[in-house]
Amino acid sequence: MSEAQSGRGKMTDGVGPRVQTLRGARCGQAKRITWLLASLLLASLILLIMILFGPRVTAVNSTSNSDSAKASMPIADYSKFSHSSPKEHADLMARSNCASCHRRSDSSIEPKFPIHKDCTGCHLVQFTAANSSSSVNPICTVCHKPGGLNSSSAPLKSFPRLLSFAVEFDHAQHLKGIESARPGNGCAACHALANRGVAETIPARLNAHQICYDCHSPGRSASKTASCGSCHRLGSYSATSIAARSYRVGFSHADHSQRERLSCDRCHDVRGRGLPQAKQVSSIAPVQHLSNSRAQNCIACHNGQRAFGESANFNECARCHKRTGFRTGE
């Protein structure tokens, strides 16, 4: 009996530790599952919050950033007009687009103002927006004088002098191109005597329009190139002055043209097409003193037989150079 009881006691002691280990493992696994479920639940909750409230936060931030950007941008001044800005205006400066605002129906030398629908197509908001700070709508003063804006015929401003346009004129195209492009009177069609016959006029500003429109007008020989963009583009322009170095001598175009029946091409050559303004027509200045040059120069006529009487004494500089203080090389 004592051995049986002893053996039964030993068997009980052997089973106890295994049961406790199994219970502990199950308890740990349950804790891990519980922690994993809690983590998943928390992650789902955070994701739900982001989905529900994220767009609102983004919208608030975007609005805040947008308002900040707008506050930092300069306010557009619609009382002033520029052909070069903003970009939408510059894009209209292509050769074929000028007529979308400036229409030519006759040979008037001043460009006509655009009509209202030319502007309201893009600036309807500016035309219709209320302006509490002033009784005058700023965009209206681009074309109209502030006084009398409410009348049925608001007075227009006069055109200011435009300085933002370059001029493209090609002598070779007009003198060596197709027959219909050549002026009937040649150089004299554009250049007249000036400074008592010493110089030749150079068309500029509205005077140039008056000369060009003899051909470049609706119904005329060059009506296909009658829009603003045919001659003008954005950029600066420097007109040739009749006070240039070549005119600071005792030389008279009048004496050498009408009286002597000489044409311009006796002294000047029209060069090829597409050259810069200052290089389209040759100058006689570099070779005018050379007696052995094949180029056209003064000695071609002033050779002691046709001019200057008995001798062509070009050592007497005062024959041509009349300016006080003249120095050799000028």
Image (tube, helix red, strand yellow):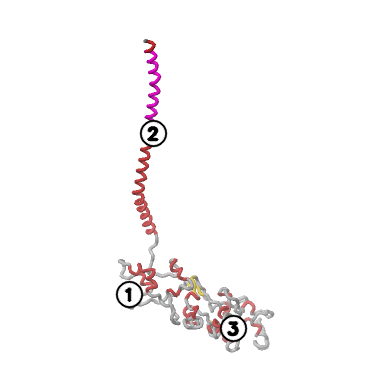
Question: What quarter of the picture does the C terminus occupy?
Answer: bottom right
Q: Which residues are magenta?
A: 5-28
Residue closest to the eye, 60 or 284: 60
Magenta part mainly helix, strand or loop? helix
Give how far across and how far down residue 302 sits, in percent: 65, 85
Looking at the image, tell me whether mark 2 or mark 1 is earlier in sequence order: 2
Mark 3 or mark 2: whose residue is earlier in sequence: 2
Amino acid carrying label 3: it is: Cys
Disc number at residue 263? none
95 or 268, which is in the foreground?
A: 95
Q: Secondary structure at mark 3?
A: helix
Amino acid type at circle 1 is: Leu
Q: Is residue 232 visible?
A: yes
Amino acid beneath label 2: Arg
Residue 228's x, y, as percent?
47, 76
Whole-percent x, y for residue 65 in the image: 38, 55
Q: Can residue 324 be seen?
A: no
304 to the left or right of 149: right
Task: State if disc 2 and disc 3 touch (CB < 8 Å).
Answer: no
At x 37% / y 35%, what residue is drawn? 35
Question: Which of the two labelled residues, at mark 3 and mark 1, occupies the earlier sequence position?
Answer: 1
Choose between 215 and 322: the one closer to the eye: 215
Determine the secondary structure under disc 2: helix
Tell me, for residue 32, which label it has, or none: 2
Dot 3 corresponds to which residue? Answer: 264
Q: Residues within 10 Å of mark 2 (few under 14, many from 20)?
A: few
Label 1: element kind? loop
Q: Farthest residue toward the right?
A: 292
**Structural distance between the alpha carbons of marks 3 and 2:** 106 Å
Of marks 2 and 1, the one in the foreground:
2
Residue 149: give its label: 1
